Image: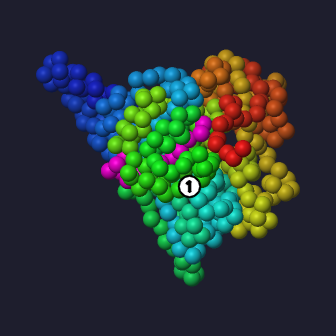
Amino acid sequence: MRGLLACAALARRAAGSSGAAPARVRHLASAAEAAEAELKKTALYDFHVANGGKMVPFAGWSMPIQYKDSIMESTVNCRTNGSLFDVAHMCGLSLKGRGAIPFLESLVIADVAGLKDGTGTLTVFTNEKGGAIDDSIVTKVTDQHIYLVVNAGCRDKDLAHIEAHMEAFNKKGGDVKWHIHDERSLLALQGPLAAPTLQLLTKEDLSKMYFSDFKMIDINGYACFLTRTGYTGEDGFEISVPSENAVDLAKAILEKSEDKVRLTGLGARDSLRLEAGLCLYGNDMEQHITPVEAGLSWAIGKRRRAEGGFLGADVILKQLQEEGPKIRRVGMFTQGPPARGHSELVSSSGEKIGEVTSGGFSPCLKKNIAMGYVKSGLHKAGTEFKVVVRGKSYDAVVTKMPFVPTKYYKPS
């Protein structure tokens, strides 16, 4: 995709200098423009471009990877002031009906029934082998209304999976229906200025709303779904707003912050979530990785451990109760060039013991950090091994995550 876009730019330059571009370049340019046209655009696309957003293909969408600030600057600004992200490529949906909770609990590891109304949790959709289909934030609005958000790159497979099981559930007398919130856009406001800035736009007392709490409230006069959550490790909110109001709400947030909260792209979002030790599906979690292996055992409720009842429960509960997982996700500090996904982890004798799944230079810690999977027994903090980057071995040591302390807003 990026190569095609580069060809389009080349064609425009060639046409500008000589009046007509060579036939092959024109062909590549038209292919690039067609590919670009096929990308979906969020309601904020023009707003991103007008504000200097550098747009790239991501999960079938044209999304900003950064703005005028560098990714390093944007990452640090989120932790010192605040960031506003367009995450409208993600898919919000509601499940409603008397069977909404038992239906969802057949597909995920969370104790959804045990949640208080208006609260949520991270969960994982599992397959029959216990592997992760996707991770999701799920919120119990009421006993008969569940709101959840799934990843953009997993949307099609997630919706097909949910729909197939919902059809089977209802055929057996179940009562659940869904609504996909394509009429809404999702914004993520993160950082220390998130709450004081948003408070200026709503009458709701946000000091009484804690991490993972959910409310349907007016923000700047728009009917919003508000969840106190995020993907940065900072305090913050995800705001589901009617798409026709998304740009105006983004403008209002930036204005009320006196421009200290900045538009921030996917580049800094990835640095921030890595510093917070959070998984990226497709990198750190995949169909063959169980929640236990991914270090998400805490997300399996006590009742679910006792009763099971979700896809792959036999595999997952065995890992919890008997044999333990054969591999485990770990955080690590590395030397040399930053380790990236698929960099090999090896013992001092050269034996392969694992693989990096995410890695980079931490803008806040000013050192290399990475996540990956190693054989069980090598996962404890302080364990040393080597990481192979560009054919050379460098020192690596396991460390506890998150790398940067989280600042979630919880009752004192």
Callout 1: few (<14), some (14-19), or many (20+) C-alpha neighbours within 10 Å? Answer: many
Vertical side of 158 occupied by 369: above or below: above
Indicate the position of residue 161 as horizontal and vertical percent values: 54, 63
Question: Image quadrant of residue 108?
Answer: bottom right
Question: Image quadrant of residue 24?
Answer: top left
User: Which residue type carries mark 1?
Assistant: Phe
Residue 238 is inside the magenta segment: yes
Using the rendered image of the protein, determine whether residue 3 is visible from the camera's viewpoint: no
Indicate the position of residue 263 as horizontal and vertical percent values: 43, 32
What is the quadrant of the C terminus in the image?
Answer: top right
Query: Residue visible at 49% across and 43% down?
Result: 199
Indicate the position of residue 104 as horizontal and vertical percent values: 60, 66
Specify start and end residues of the magenta stretch as a single range. 234-246
* Viewer-closest of 41 and 396: 41
* Viewer-closest of 228 and 55: 228
Using the rendered image of the protein, determine whether residue 46 is visible from the camera's viewpoint: yes
Can you name the residue that lies furthest to the left here?
19
**Secondary structure of the residue carrying numbered label 1:** strand
What is the quadrant of the N terminus in the image?
Answer: top left
Question: Is residue 10 found left or right of 395 in the rendered image?
Answer: left
Give the labeled residue for mark 1.
214
* Viewer-closest of 379 and 247: 247
Query: Residue visible at 47% across and 50% down?
Result: 203
Query: Residue visible at 70% across and 23% down?
Result: 334
Indicate the position of residue 15 as horizontal and vertical percent values: 18, 23
Vertical side of 156 occupied by 167: above or below: below
Query: Residue visible at 43% across and 58% down?
Result: 181
User: Colour scheme of this structure image?
Assistant: rainbow
